[in-house]
Each structure stands twice: as C-alpha cells, then as structure tokens.
Amino acid sequence: MSETKTYKLPIGPVHVGLKEPITAWLDIEGEHIKDAVIRPGAIHRGVEFMARERNPIQVIYLAERVCGICSFSHAIAFVKAVEDAAQIEVPIRAQYIRSMVLELERIHSHILWSGVACYTIGFDSAFHLGMMLREKVMDVLEALSGNRVNYAVTTVGGVRWDVTPAVVRTVMDMIHYYRNEFASFYEAAINDPVVKARLRDVGVLTTEQAIKYCALGPTSRGSGVRADVRWSAPYDAYCDIHVEPVVPQDYTGEVHGDVYDRFLVRVYEVLQSLDILEKIMEGLPEGSITFEPKVNKLLTVLKKAEGVGYGCIEAPRGDDTHAVGLKAQQENVQWWKVRAPTYSNAVSWPLMFKDNELADAPLIINSIDPCISCMERMVLSDTSSGTKSVVTKADLLKLCREKTDKTRRLMGA
Amino acid sequence: MILGLIMRVIAGIALMLLITVFAVLFEGVDRKLHAVMQRRIGPPLLQPVYDILKLLGKENIVPRWATPVFFHGGPWVAMIASMMVFMYIPMGSLPPVLNGSGDLILILYLLSLSGVAVAVGGFASGSPIANVGAQREMILMMSYEVPLAIVVSTLAWFAYKLGMPGHPFSLETYVATSVWSVVGKAGFLGLICLFVAILTVIPGETGKGLMDIPEAKTEILEGVTVEYSGVNLALLHIGFNLRGAAISALVVSLFFPFSLGKAIGLSGVPMAIIDFPWFWVKVFLVEVFGVTFLRTAFGRLKIWQASHFYWAQVGALSLAGMILISVDVLLH
C-alpha cells in the first residue's frame, strides 16, 4: 500500500469562519487533521506599553478597548488592581452595579458565541435568532450607560452611573423576555440533530488535559472542571450571592469535553446569569456609588499610592487577570500586565485539533471563544537566515532608527 | 429537414436564455424567502442578476499554479452541461427541443458532467483549499448518485412492467401518464419513498443547506470556487442555479406531471401556453422546498456524514421504495 501524503493547509489569518486573525497550520491527510501548529502574531497592539503614558483613570478607557466583547471585564479587572494597589474601598452599591453589568456582559457574550458557533456549522437561522435575542441585552446596557459596547460604567473606587428605577424596570423586563424567548434558541440549537452531529465528540479536551494545560472559564467547565472565580474567590456581589460553576455533568450526567459541552455550558450560564441578575436587583443596597466623585481628588489619592495590585475576575471567557504597578509621586501607571483568558485556553488548541476533521477546524478554534487581540504578546523571530534568533527590544529600536534615517534620506530631508 | 434543424436551434437558444433568466431569478426568490424565514429583510429579488452582471464585467484572475485550460474550461462545461439538460425535459405539454434524441440516462449524465466539470476546475486551480472542495464535490456526487440512480431505474422498470405508453427511459412517458395514476396501494407507498429520496438529492445536487459541503464558506472559503473571479465565477453561479432548476424540473417531470391545461379542459396550443408557466411554478415550488426550506432549517453536515446519509438512510429509503413497487407490480 502506498503511503498517504499529508499536506499543509492554513486556516487564517483572515478566514470567514474566524472572528479574529490567527493562523492554524494543519497537517491534513484527506479530511483528517494529523497535527496542527498555531501561529499567532498578526494583531499585537502594544496596549500595555501605551498605558505607561497615562494615569490610572485614563487607562480605564484603554482597558475597555482591549476587547470589544468583554470590555467591562477588562475595565473591572484593571480597576480592581488599582484599588488593590491604592487600598481603596468600594461602596457596596457600586459593587452590586459592577456585578450586574458583568452578568449582562456575560449574557451578551455567550449568546453571541452560541450564534457564531451555529454560523460556523452553516446553521444561519440559529445564528440570526441568536443575534436577534442579543439585541435585548444590548438595549439594557444602552439604557444603563448610553453605550452598546465599551460602557464606561466603572471608575476607580466605584461606578459612574447609578441604577435608576427605569433601569431596574428594563433589567426586569429583559429577564422576563429571556425566560420566555431564550428557550426558542435553546431548542433550535441544542436539540437540532445536525447541530448535535456536528458538535458532539469534536475538539475533545478531557478533564485531565483541561487541568494539566490550565484551561479556564467555559472551556474548562465544558471539560467538567469546576473552576469559576465567582465560586472559588468571590468578589463584589458574588460574596453575597452563591454561584455554582456550570458543568455539563450536572445537566446531562456525563462529560465529553467536546464543543457540544462547551455550547451547553454557555447556554446554561445565560440562564444562570438571569438568576444572578434577579438576585442582584432584589438585593441592590442603597448608598453612594463611588469612593470619590471628583476626579481631581481621586487622582491625588492615586498619585500618593505606591505598590503592586492584582485584579482577577471571571470574564465570559474565563479568568481575566490584571496586575498594575503604581509609584508614589508618579502620575502615570508604572507598568500594567493583562492576562486575558485566551492566553491560557489557546494552549489547548493543538490537543483539540488532533484526530478531528478539516470541517471542524474553525469550530474548534472558535470553541474557546478566542480573543486574539487580547492575547497577543510580541516575540519577533528571524528565521530567514536559517539560524533562529529572537529580535530584542534594542534590535527593534536599532531597526526602527535605521528605517527612519532611510526614509528621511529618501525624502531628501 | 434543414428548416426543422434551424427551428430547433432557434427554439433551443431561446429556451436556454429564458431558462437561465428563470434559474437566476429563482436564486433571488430563494435568498428573499430565506431572509424572511429568518425575520430579516434580505436582498432585492434581482440581486443575483446584478451580481452576475457585475461579475461578467470583471477580469478573470488565473492563479500562478493553475492549469489554465481546465481552469477556464470547468465553468463553461459546468454551465453548458446544466443548460443541455433542459433540451431533454418536456416543459409542461411542450415536447422537449431535442425530442427523441436523449433520455433520462443522458440527463443524469449531464448533471454529473456539470458536477465533474466544477470539480475539475477546482483541482486545476492549484489551490489546496479548492482541492479540498473538489474532493468533497466528487465524494458528495458519488453519494447522491446512488439513490438517484435507484429512483430513476425503479421508475423505468415500473413503467416498462406496467406497459406505460412510450419508452421507459424517456421523460415524455412520465409526463404523458402520471405514475401516481397507475399504482396500487403498495406502489403508492413505494412512490412516496422514492419521492422523498429524490427530494433529499436536491440539496446535494445544488450544494445548499445541509449539503453545502463543497463550498462551505466558514470551513474552506467557498472551496471549489475560491480561486474563481470575474466571468468564470459568473458562469459558475449560472451553472449552479441551472443545476438546481434542472434537478427540480426532473422531479416535477417524474412526480408532478399534472397538466393545468388539461384540468380546465384546454387542448392544443392554449394548453401548451398555460402549461409552460404552470410547469415553472411547480419547479419553483419544488425548489423552494428542496433548497430554501431545507437550508433554512438545517446546518451543514460533514462530508462523511453526508455520504453516510445518502448511502445508508436515503439509500435504504429508495430501496424500500423499490421493493414496495416490485410488490405492487407482482400484485397487478
């Protein structure tokens, strides 16, 4: 028998099935994936570097723009890190409002992902249904903050917008709407035989692998690991509201660790978020919403602060960890480190790819709900000369100056 | 003799143009209905026409690794083969243009040729993604040809055994005498099985909905057509549209030959005039169900799942139809 030939096929960096640019080089044998190599490096933005020229309040708006979908999670994680460094107490009401917006964001992120998963397998009707359902939560966020994305709700020491009775009404309406309408999406997507055939036993990540490779959020919960920051290290309103991690074995009695399980986890988490929201709205305490409403005074407090702070929260895609360094008498943030959940989850990709089919490739990439621009860190390597070498910061600076000189010469300056 | 030939050529060309317009218009209807079913507004009805007109005015880009002869030849052969099918299909009460020169087997061959030409074009483009698409096209074709062949041969055997007037492999036989009118109870059930089987072949033949596998834009970026642009892409689009109309026309001729003209007591030229649009209404309805409805209701299968579906499930259904019809013939 002749040997079967494998050939390389790229999925990405620009691909219809992917939301963001990343390349998966697949070793294909017919339709079978023998091996996969993930090559990021298409969209590094240098956000952390940009923060060093801004004060903590200005960085909040930068943090929000790390990601469009979990923008509030990034902002909260950053703000928590700053509060930790400067030892600022946040009023209880503000904590509740933060948790409320985090849950709203989780609902919109999960519905969006579920729709995109349906789109990836060609089930456009479920995708459109999902997008239509998502509108309601976007409307609520708009009613609260005036924005549909990048809500700008939080600030250091509290929140900027209070929840008015009108907003409470829209949130309660939304909960009622989803309790009635979400079932149609749920039925259409979960019970559809074609969806089941496409998602079951695809991109399997076993419980052991999920633990070993440090998967986070719905990816780890889909593999049956009870991991949820809201449960293991409660913060804000979650200290009062008990949140149990959503794992497939509690609902179906078994764990496959496949894309279908991740789908189930996200769908059930939407329902769980509705319950949490209801409890938050019921228990919303009275009081102030910010530690210091005047920005100048707040900046003075922050300027005096010195130290390192951490903030870790459960974003829709998993743990979102921010660390920040502040120095006394320095207005700007000294350093800022963002660890988005995709950074940990992406490690599991090659495992998930093994022994699947080409048709599953975009679905597997999407199954961890990747946010590539949140994840990208830069390493420049020069492979053209045959000997691999890593380009350092000094090299980059030298190359940059050479290029500028060359451009100047060309322009006759 | 020569005059007859010229008349045939003129009729053929006129019919081809008309059918191309119908087939492309159907895509507009399909997209609109698909959108309405998803509670969207959707594109205007004439959008596919605009698309094709735009593409016809664009440059053909040939990839560096392509084999130009096959790369350019594929779309032309695919389109012409699907067009030729209509030369052998009776339109309502009108006889086929190439009357007596071909039969059902030829139609099946032409439909396959169209698929093969698309696949050859994909292979010839030299892109690994188009290559995967072309492989999928071939596998899908091999899968749905089995139930299609069973349906057609069962009907031919049935027509032959029951002595239906005309040649058993000629479509005119089925148009003149409806198969539903000559079967018994077992045969009726058998015909339903065959009808459902051939309906499931429509998505495969058109490459839409759950059989959108060779193109699969979210997986392999439109697969076979990924390297095509300009005129070639326009031809491919027309070819795909014609293929959808052709398989639906085949289903209509085999299973719904009912004449509206005859029902309201017309004959001759008025009957032919009434039956021609009536035939197209039926084709549209079959296509709406076979293409639009199915592609709204389902996602895309994987290639081995599609193959399994056609060989096991649809194959079993068509075999059941075959057995029921055999029982019916024995009881007669």
Image (cartoon, coloured by chain):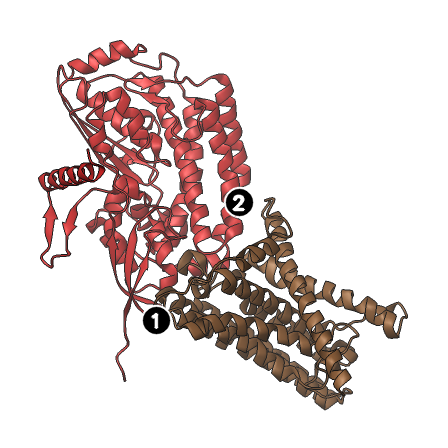
Chain colours: A red, B brown
For residue A239, say whether it is visible.
no
Q: Nearer the viewer, residue A278 or B81?
A: B81
Let me know if marks 2 and 1 both belong to one chain. Answer: yes
Q: Please tell me how crowded label 1 is: few (under 14), some (14-19), or many (20+) other residues with Cα within 10 Å.
A: some
> Can residue B284 be seen at all in this image of the molecule?
yes
Name the mark nearer the viewer: 2 or 1. 1
**Mark 1 residue type:** Gly
Q: Residues within 10 Å of mark 2 (few under 14, many from 20)?
A: some
Determine which residue is flagged by label 1. A30
Question: Residue drawn at (51%, 70%), measured in percent from left and top?
Answer: B75
Tag of residue A129 = 2
Tell me the element at label 2.
helix
Q: Amino acid at mark 2?
A: Leu
* Residue contact between numbered discs 2 and 1, judged by CB atoms under 8 Å: no
Q: Residue B324: horizontal and vertical position, in percent?
A: 66, 81
The subunit carrying tag 1 is: A
Q: Residue at x 18, y 15 (%)?
A: A303
The numbered mark, 2 or 1, whose residue comes first in the sequence reads 1
